[in-house]
Image (cartoon, grey):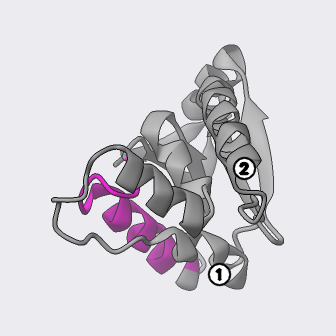
């Protein structure tokens, strides 16, 4: 049986332009109008879970110093519970790769941590990911 919730999939990095921001803003708008919506972070989209300090550090270490300033909208993720969205679904493989990078960065600077506040992160393996996506009538990818 298909769920009535719309699934928003974010594959884009927080610094890859406006695509991910558009997806997050659409999700917040839908939630504000009490439309059921789920969020799935895949691939580069896992970067939205990084603390601001790590996201900025990653941007600098990737030699992107000459890129125009791009607003980090990771704060919108932290605000999701205010809109009634308490759970984020994440691609397990991408999360594991990102966690390794976070561990490396936090060992270099213990002041950096990963705090998602009231959000529940539900990790999905490859098979569960396929089933989860198929359960939704509407799927939008950003």
Q: CA distance from mark 2 to mark 1?
A: 30 Å
**Point 65% across, 73% down: residue:** 78
Outermost residue, front side: 108
The answer to whether residue 24 is above or below residue 46 is below
Residue extent of the magenta highlight? 13-31
* Residue 64 falls inside the magenta stretch: no
Task: Say what secondary structure mark 2 lies in.
Answer: helix
Reading the image, the residue beneath label 2 is 106
Relative vertical location of residue 95 with respect to residue 39 in this rendering, above or below: above
Q: Is residue 6 left or right of residue 121?
A: left
Quarter of the image for the N terminus: give it: top right
Tell me the number on the disc at residue 75. none
Return the x and y of residue 110 as percentages of the image width and height. Answer: 78, 58
Magenta highlight: main SS: helix
**Quadrant of the rendered image containing residue 97:** top right
Instruction: Say which of 141 and 43 sits in front.
Output: 43
Q: Is residue 86 above or below residue 60?
A: below
- Mark 1, residue position: 83
Label 1 secondary element: helix
> Image quadrant of residue 125?
top right
Q: Is residue 123 left or right of residue 6?
A: right
Q: Residue at x 83, y 71 (%)?
A: 118
């Amino acid at each position: 049986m298909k769920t009535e919730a719309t699934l928003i999939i974010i594959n884009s990095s927080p610094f890859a332009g406006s695509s991910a921001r558009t997806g997050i803003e659409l999700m917040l708008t839908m939630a504000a109008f009490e439309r059921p919506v789920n969020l799935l972070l895949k691939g580069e989209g896992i970067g939205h879970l990084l603390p601001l300090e790590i996201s900025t550090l990653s941007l600098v270490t990737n030699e992107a110093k000459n890129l125009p300033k791009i607003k980090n909208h990771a704060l919108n993720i932290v605000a999701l519970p205010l809109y009634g969205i308490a759970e984020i679904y994440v691609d397990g493989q991408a999360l594991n790769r990102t966690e390794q990078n976070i561990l490396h960065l936090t060992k270099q600077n213990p002041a950096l941590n990963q705090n998602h506040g009231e959000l529940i992160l539900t990790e999905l393996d490859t098979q569960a990911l396929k089933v989860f996506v198929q359960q939704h009538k509407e799927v939008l990818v950003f």
